[in-house]
Amino acid sequence: MTLQDYVIAHTERGECKCGRCADVGNKPDPIGHTADTMFFKVAKHGEPDADTFTKLARAHRGEFNSVDPFDGNEHSYIELGGWIGDQGLALMFMGLGSLLGVFQLLTPQTLMPFLDDETKRQMAGMGMVAVKLAQKAA
C-alpha cells in the first residue's frame, strides 16, 4: 500500500462521526478525533496506527520534491503537497499524522487565536499551515 492509499483509506474530510462526536456543534471534539486544518476538518477512519503511517511516510520518495517530514523542521501543506502529489491530500496527511500523535499541527488558529478569522484565513492561504514532529515522536 502506498502512503497516498493509506491516507485516503484512513481519513475522511469532515468531523468525526464516532458517536461521541455526533452533533458536537460549538463544543470541541474529543481530543484525537478531529484535526482542523483551517481549510477543512480531518477525521480518522478505520484503525490507522502511527507505526504503519510512519513507515509508509519514510518510504515515500516524493512526487515532485523530496521532503523528510521527520527531520524536526516545520513543513507546510504547500511543500508537503508537492511531496505527496496534492495539497488537499497533504492536509489529510497532516491531519492524520496529528491525530496519530506523530505531528503537531500548526495553524494560525492554534498559534494566534487572538487574530480575527479573516486574517487567519489569509495566513492559511499563504501556506501558514504546517506540521512539526511531535515531541513524543521525536
Image (cartoon, rainbow, N blue to C red):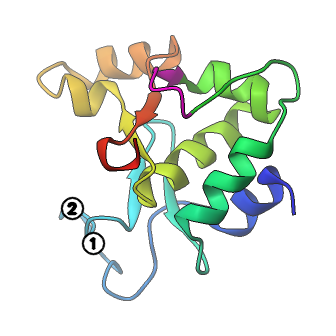
Amino acid at circle 1? Val
The magenta stretch spans which residues?
Answer: 70-75
Q: Residue at x 74, y 68 (%)?
A: 9
Pointers 1 and 2 in contact (CB under 8 A)? yes
Taking the image as shown, residue 32 lies to the left or right of residue 10, namely left
Residue at label 1?
Answer: 24
The local secondary structure at tag 2 comes to loop
- Asked whether 84 falls inside the magenta stretch, the response is no
Q: Is residue 19 above or below residue 59?
A: below
Residue 83, by quadrant, is: top right
Residue at label 2?
Answer: 28
Task: Locate the N terminus by quadrant.
Answer: bottom right
Mark 1 and mark 2: Cα distance apart in space: 7 Å
Instruction: Indicate the position of residue 49 as horizontal and vertical percent values.
Output: 56, 70
Q: Residue furthest front?
A: 138
The local secondary structure at tag 1 comes to loop
Decide which of 25, 9 is in the foreground and name it: 9
Instruction: Indicate the position of residue 135 as horizontal and vertical percent values.
Output: 30, 41
